[in-house]
Amino acid sequence: MNGRRAVIVGGSIGGLFAGNMLVQQGWEVDILERAKDDLSSRGTGIARHLELEQLLKRLGIVVDDTVGIDVSGRTAFDRNGKIIAEYSLPQRLGAWNRVFEPLFEKFPREHYHNGSEFTGMETTDVITKVQSANGQVFEADIVIGADGFSSTVREFVAPGVKPTYGGYVAWRGVSDEENLTTEFLASIFSHYAFLFVPKSLLIGYPMAGSNGSVTIGKRRYNYLWYYPTTEENLKELLTDNEGYL
Ligand SMILES: Cc1cc2nc3c(=O)[nH]c(=O)nc-3n(C[C@H](O)[C@H](O)[C@H](O)COP(=O)(O)OP(=O)(O)OC[C@H]3O[C@@H](n4cnc5c(N)ncnc54)[C@H](O)[C@@H]3O)c2cc1C
């Protein structure tokens, strides 16, 4: 321990990377995560990049061939399934939880606080006191905001900065390999696929199965449909299991 303390708001991939890096350098770190439950079931496919593998390895996390499925490049299809363009770009495509879980397992469990929502902080010359909605107070030399695109920490440090709507939504889905047709498996499954349709873009790529398996027959195909819409329409479109967000 180097005697320095950090509080990280947000216990997803960003927060866990920062937290593990600081612990490795001798910091005492507490992570406040608003969600009450484990985040592992979040996320679908994720494209893995060299920087990601390097950072995981630096933390001593094993990165081997089972973390993803290799594709040779990107392939554009027309609406009849015919290939119209190919771009060589070897890449490994993985599953979000195969990034999150090893980071979560690496971090000291007793310092990861689920159900702890950041509500504010006060800074003096020497220390910052961080408050969470459940009444806990943490003292820190630094506070890191890793609380996502609608960050509450950002509201404190840069109140004038507001996110702006990008102009489109994305529907995201995942199919088990065993539910896909033979035709789809033969012509599209192994591709990082792009389909351009009027006002829309669809992309899809293979990913590990729900148990993390990359064995043939046990994998999944992950797809996104990007669709432009007005900000007013978001109220109707953004829903969860309990209704409108
Ligand atoms: C260029 C680019 C490419 C991307 N490609 C992919 C991809 O291929 N696949 C994919 O899945 N994603 C992709 N993403 C999205 C991104 O990787 C994921 O969304 C990732 O989970 C972001 O991690 P994060 O830790 O920054 O934020 P988040 O995952 O959004 O986590 C923020 C966390 O903060 C918590 N939180 C929020 N407010 C508070 C509060 N007040 N107190 C305490 N906790 C709070 C939330 O509960 C959440 O757990 C991409 C993003 C970019 C920018």
Image (cartoon, rainbow, N blue to C red):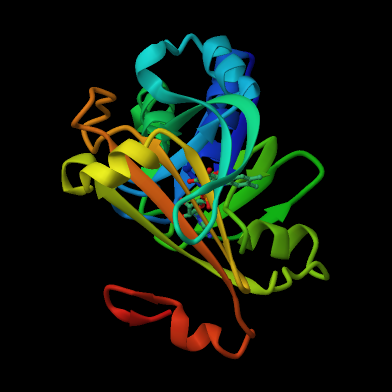
Q: Look at 38% across and 37% down and name the residue there.
A: 206
Q: Is residue 44 left or right of residue 219?
A: right
**17 and 95: which is toward the camera:** 95
Residue 3, picture quadrant:
top right
Say whether residue 210 is visible: yes
Q: Where does residue 202 sit, x and y in percent of width and height?
A: 51, 58
Q: x, y (%) of residue 16? A: 51, 33
**Could you say where residue 12 lies in the image, as x and y percent from the top left?**
48, 43
Measured as percent of width and height from the top left, residue 6 is found at 61, 34
Residue drawn where x is 70% and y is 69% of the image: 166
Q: Is residue 162 left or right of residue 31?
A: right
- Report whether 243 appears left or right of 2: left
Q: Quadrant of the C terminus?
A: bottom left
Relative to 216, residue 231 above or below? below
Vertical placement of 195 versus 236: above or below? above
122 above or below 230? above
Nearer to the camera, 104 or 169: 169
Where residue 139 sits, quadrant-wise, is top right
- Residue 26 showing in the rendered view: no
Q: Residue at x 44, y 26 (%)?
A: 103
Q: What residue is drawn where x is 58% and y is 37%?
A: 74
